Image (cartoon, rainbow, N blue to C red):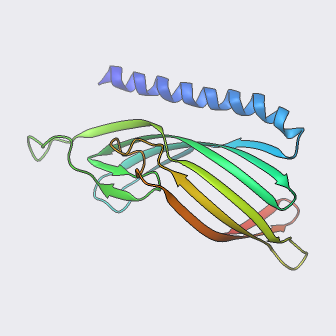
Amino acid sequence: MKREKTSRVRCHCIVIGASVVMLTSVAPVLAEDPLWAISGFINYSRGDYGTSKDTTLLYIPFTLRVTPLERVTVSLTVPYLEQTTQTVFLTGGGVAVRKEKVRELQTARERVTRTERGLGDVLLKGQYVLLEERPTFPEIGSYLKIKFPTADEERGLGTGEFDETLGLDLSKTFLERLVAYLT
């Protein structure tokens, strides 16, 4: 048990360290060219997600964004996922679903806790700004998102299916640095 925890901590450190190195070394180069941008963040959450079992989720997406035309943006997001749960798995889309138990419980007090980690479902997004922001009006943009089933469905890291979403984004800047979004 102690060896597994040490291995998990080491894996977290490697992923976080690689993320920091990538973002601090590549981002300044891309910042010189406003057509390209790279971003990433770390999201750690814990909850029951509508089930009776707690799940811990570490989500680290890396996004490459290209703006080839003034009103057109295309982005590609590649996420790393790690989830620890008791016989409940989250899909790549964040919806909790119960999977078949990995093994039958010997007693009512026994728990089967699993940790799965790896590549999540890749997301491609194209956006077109329909109306640029004005002093009294928000920016309005239409978008199309396509989720590719790149994650391992058997391990609960993704849905195993393509998903498409068509929608609108509204954004408004306040006080020069505060931006409100509505999707």
Q: Residue furthest left?
A: 107
Q: Quadrant of residue 104?
A: top left
> Relative to 35, does residue 25 appear above or below in the rendering?
above
Which of the image's four quarters has the N terminus? Answer: top left
Q: Is residue 15 left or right of residue 168?
A: left
Residue plotted at (61% across, 68% down): 166
Dividing the picture into quarters, in which one does residue 37 lie? top right
* Horizontal side, residue 47 vs residue 32: left or right: left
| Residue at the top extreme, as displayed | 3
Can you give x and y, in whole percent of width and height, for residue 71 in the image? Answer: 83, 62
Assign the C terminus to one quadrant of the image: bottom right
* Residue at the extreme bottom of the image, as rendered: 136
Is 134 positioned to the left or the right of 163 in the image?
right
The structure residue drawn at horizontal position 82% and vertical position 37%, both measured from the top left corner, is: 30
Q: Is residue 95 left or right of residue 35?
A: left
Identify the residue shown where x is 87% and y is 58%: 70
